[in-house]
Amino acid sequence: MSPKVNVQIQFDLRCTPAEFRAHADHVAGAFAALPGLLSKVWIIDEERGRAGGVYLFADRLAATAYLEGPIVKGLRENPALAGVEVRLFDVIEGPSVITRGLPPSGQTPEDARAPRAAM
């Protein structure tokens, strides 16, 4: 099994935080459908005018396809954004499961969120 991959993307906003939030709401569904994407956390630092995302992909192939695809190309060409920074990391699964960053092996993210039965 190949390791899960974390992608971090950050950029400077050349639009208002409200405009960025509205755009994020508008495109979130498209991100949810990305092949191999397990999760994405949208981030913003309004005081510094920066935003971005933290992604978890099933494997390096899916992460690389995303980074080489039209969405990231569009980020780099978008006049409302500047200084796009991309970082890619392999996820260390064992401790990430312990600290609840990943569900236990064999569970889906939905399984991990389900309420546990009382004993």
Image (cartoon, rainbow, N blue to C red):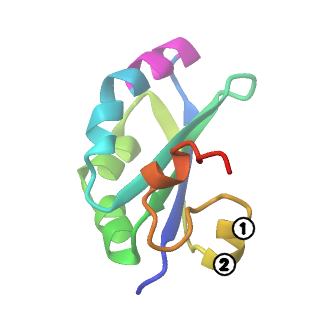
For the image, the number of numbered tags is 2
Residue 89 at x, y percent in the picture? 57, 72
- The residues tagged by marks 1 and 2 sit, at their Cα atoms, a distance apart of 7 Å
Residue 11 visible (yes or no): no
Residue 45 at x, y percent in the picture? 69, 30
**Magenta stretch contains residue 102:** no
Q: Is residue 102 above or below residue 55?
A: below
Query: Which residue is label 2 attached to?
Result: 94
* Amino acid tagged 1: Ile
The residue nearer to you, when weighing 42 against 119, is: 119
Residue 74 at x, y percent in the picture? 31, 43
| 70 left or right, relative to 76 | left
For image coordinates 31% across by 51% down, the residue present is: 73
The residue nearer to you, when weighing 16 against 34, is: 34
Q: Is mark 1 in CB contact (under 8 Å) with mark 2?
A: yes
Magenta part of the chain? 16-23
For image coordinates 57% across by 18% down, the residue present is: 17
Q: Secondary structure at mark 2?
A: helix
* Amino acid tagged 2: Gly
Q: Secondary structure at mark 1?
A: helix
For image coordinates 40% across by 22% down, the residue present is: 25
Residue 43 visible (yes or no): yes
| 86 left or right, relative to 33 | right
For image coordinates 35% across by 70% down, the residue present is: 64
Query: Which residue is label 1 attached to?
Result: 98
Kindly give the residue lying farthest to the bottom in the view shown. 1
The residue nearer to you, when weighing 77 against 19, is: 19
Residue 118 at x, y percent in the picture? 65, 45
The residue nearer to you, when weighing 65 against 13, is: 65
Q: Is residue 92 above or below residue 45?
A: below
